[in-house]
Image (cartoon, grey):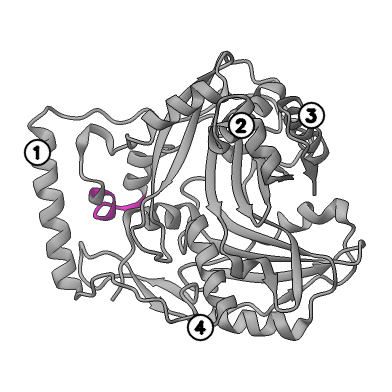
């Protein structure tokens, strides 16, 4: 049977309260009302596709947890009243509640009618099930009629053979690491304790949409790329919010899949950005960073995290990929997701949200940015987890628009 990888298990632990809770979300906006029967068909395709699975424990110590098909799903959730566009993201932020990758369902499809005459559709799933690119691939499968047909080349083996393979990998890797000396425990990524605004929610969201040629021209003017301009934009929004540091550390996810698998298939790298950096200098920094990976501490094999108790694994990996900002470039979305049946999508956003996050659980990451291209537009999603400096969604939206305009991007907010 298909097994969880190390990243799957890390995100499973966050679901259990060990770390920052994360759910992936795709948002679609249309100019007209979407037919409920169409959403029912999409929902059924998703239920039969690769998101329709759950985690089951192994029967042999040392074997990895496995995936089991699970067609049980939440019904399509329809908002009970027409939603003002100004409240779209407040509604979207609540769609990650009660997702359960172990006992299911681990995903939810929901929709609301907007007061501009259009609709918004949300697909949210536990990060244990998929990363951002995988979520889009799952939607591509559902909308193109290939749900459940994508090949899965993950080796299928018994618990006994998987446990033997895991133990051998860990023992050999640990012995090799110990020959270099006993590794020290990693320093947990954290932030200084800061006061938060009374009654303020721990996270706030904003989404900007910009014509792709405008984004590309702005990047060219600064001798950068679409990606390096994106990274600088996220960092600048954080500085404009009042972040005091002269340097911002950024974590950058890297898609490592060699084929379009629906899985968590990413690595992480990092770079440091100064106030003097430009899209041109960030371009060079990012090129160097993408050649490196954030690795396990002391060269220990990462599979060790799947053999030890969850709380020990959490202590060893706590905050490993967290930096001041996260910049996730999801890339160009497939043409299939640009329409829902006869309904043309005017905007699509892909991002992560943090259901159930409390002010006491705030991660080191203060601002997360997610960029995707859909047709002739780039869509930038921002999620702030710095309530001391960003007290509302309106404040983040104003910061983002002002920063984009100063960079030469005529972006429009959702």
Task: Judge left or right: residue 53 versus residue 235.
Answer: left
| Foreground disc of the pair 4, 2 | 2
Mark 4 lies on residue: 48
Please name the residue shown 32% across and 45% down the image: 312
Answer whether labels 2 and 3 touch (C-beta < 8 Å): no
* Mark in the foreground, 1 or 4: 4
Q: Which structural element holds mark 4?
A: helix
Per the image, label 2 sits on a secondary structure element best described as helix
Task: Point out which mark residue 176 bears.
Answer: 1
Identity of the residue drawn at 53% across and 23% down: 280
Check whether the beta carbons of the residues at disc 4 and disc 2 lie within 8 A of each other.
no
Along the polypeptide, which appears first: circle 2 or circle 1? 1
Reply above or below: 65 against 312.
below
Q: Alpha-carbon distance for marks 1 and 4?
A: 43 Å
Depth-wise, is mark 3 or mark 1 nearer the camera? 3
Q: Which mark is residue 219?
A: 2
Tell which tag, 2 or 3, sits nearer the viewer.
Answer: 2
The answer to whether the residues at label 2 and label 1 have Cβ atoms under 8 Å apart is no
Q: Upstream in the sequence, badge 4 or badge 2?
A: 4
In which quadrant is the N terminus drawn?
A: bottom left
Disc 4 crowd, CA 10 A, few/some/many (<14, 14-19, 20+):
some
Residue 203 x/y as whole percent: 69, 42
Q: Nearer the viewer, residue 311 or 254?
A: 254
- Percent position of residue 226, x then y: 57, 38
């Amino acid at each position: 049977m298909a097994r969880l990888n190390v990243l799957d298990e890390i995100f499973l632990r966050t679901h259990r309260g060990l770390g920052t809770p994360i759910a992936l979300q795709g948002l679609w906006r249309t100019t007209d009302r979407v037919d409920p029967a169409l959403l029912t068909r999409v929902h059924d395709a998703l239920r039969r596709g690769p998101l329709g699975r759950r985690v089951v424990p192994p029967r042999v110590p040392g074997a990895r947890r496995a995936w089991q098909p699970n067609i049980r799903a939440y019904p399509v959730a329809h908002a009970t009243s027409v939603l003002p566009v100004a409240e779209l993201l407040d509604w979207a932020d609540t769609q990650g509640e009660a997702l359960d990758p172990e006992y299911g369902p681990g995903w939810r499809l929901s929709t609301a009618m907007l007061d501009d005459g259009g609709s918004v559709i949300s697909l949210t799933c536990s990060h244990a099930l998929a990363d951002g690119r995988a979520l889009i691939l799952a939607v591509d499968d559902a909308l193109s009629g290939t749900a459940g047909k994508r090949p899965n080349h993950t080796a299928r083996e018994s618990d006994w053979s998987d446990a033997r393979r895991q133990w051998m990998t860990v023992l050999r890797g640990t012995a090799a690491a110990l020959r270099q000396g006993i590794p020290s425990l990693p320093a947990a990524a954290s932030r200084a304790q800061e006061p938060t605004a009374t009654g303020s929610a721990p996270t706030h969201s904003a989404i900007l949409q910009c014509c792709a040629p405008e984004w590309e021209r702005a990047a060219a003017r600064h001798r950068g790329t679409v990606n390096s301009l994106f990274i600088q934009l996220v960092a600048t929004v954080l500085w404009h919010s009042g972040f005091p540091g002269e340097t911002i550390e950024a974590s950058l996810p890297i898609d490592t899949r060699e084929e379009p698998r629906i899985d968590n298939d990413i690595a992480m790298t990092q770079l440091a950005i100064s106030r003097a950096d430009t899209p041109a200098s960030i371009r060079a920094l990012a090129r160097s960073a993408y050649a490196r990976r954030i690795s396990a501490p002391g060269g220990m094999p990462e599979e060790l995290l799947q053999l030890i108790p969850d709380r020990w694994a959490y202590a060893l990996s706590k905050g490993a990929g967290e930096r001041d900002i996260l910049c996730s470039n999801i890339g160009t979305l497939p043409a299939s997701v640009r329409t829902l049946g006869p309904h043309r999508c005017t905007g699509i956003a892909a991002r992560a949200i943090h259901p159930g996050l409390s002010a006491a659980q705030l991660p080191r990451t203060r601002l997360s940015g997610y960029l995707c291209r859909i047709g002739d537009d780039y869509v930038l999603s921002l999620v702030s987890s710095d309530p001391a400096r960003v007290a509302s969604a309106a404040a983040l939206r104003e910061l983002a628009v002002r920063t984009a305009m100063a960079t030469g991007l005529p972006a429009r907010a959702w």
